[in-house]
Amino acid sequence: METKKKPSTTLEFLVIMLLIVFAVIFAWNVNVDGLFNKLTNANPSKAIQKQEQQTATADNKWKAGKDLYRANCASCHNTKTEGTGPALIGVRNRWQAAGSYNGKSGGQWLHEWVKNWHDPVDQQYKYAVDMANTRPAQMNIFPYLSDDDIEQIFNFVDSTSAPVVSASVN
């Protein structure tokens, strides 16, 4: 009787385990990537397109703000320095810091000021009254500017560099 040599059971076990491990790793990578793409709707070209659209939208808003600023504000206001009107950089922060009054935030009062400065003055909003009393010229009124237009102007203004502060000489 002829005896057949059996392969080593340990070696056979290791080979089978390696095959199983490789199969699991392969299946895991395929399924995880597919699942991730389905869950996040991740498509590199769609993500790139969305980013490009957001950049284009931001660029368009910036350009619109610049155009609105030039058409409505630049004749009296510089973004960084005082002129006939105050420097506009940081104006939203200044009005917001002035505080709320009669149920409106400082930012809302700023929008009212731009549209028709008489309204916040007539309602005795202190910051508006102080502005009206301390400026050498009256603010023009812009009732046709929407809140979005005004925000685009201030977004443009705030995107310019910080105001230049000159050193005082003693």
Image (cartoon, rainbow, N blue to C red):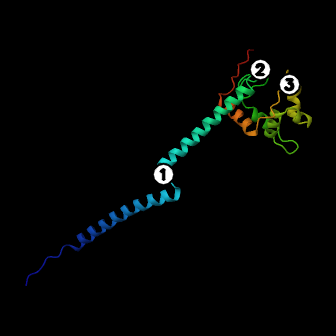
Residue 54 appears left or right of 43: right
Q: Reading the chain from its start, which is encountered first: label 1 or label 3?
A: 1
In the rendered image, residue 127, in percent from the top left (x then y), is placed at: 85, 33
Q: Is residue 99 above or below residue 26?
A: above
Which corner quadrant of the image does residue 111 belong to? top right
Q: Amino acid at mark 2?
A: Gly
Residue drawn where x is 56% and y is 42% of the image: 53
Residue wearing tag 1: 43
Q: Amino acid at mark 3?
A: Gln
Q: Amino acid at mark 1?
A: Asn
Outermost residue, bottom side: 1
In the rendered image, residue 64, in percent from the top left (x then y), is placed at: 66, 33
3D distance between C-alphas at marks 1 and 3 = 54 Å
Quarter of the rendering occupied by the C terminus: top right
Residue wearing tag 2: 83
Residue wearing tag 3: 138
Residue drawn where x is 23% and y is 74% of the image: 9
Residue 75 appears left or right of 44: right
**Marks 2 and 1: CB-CB under 8 Å?**
no
3D distance between C-alphas at marks 3 and 2 = 13 Å
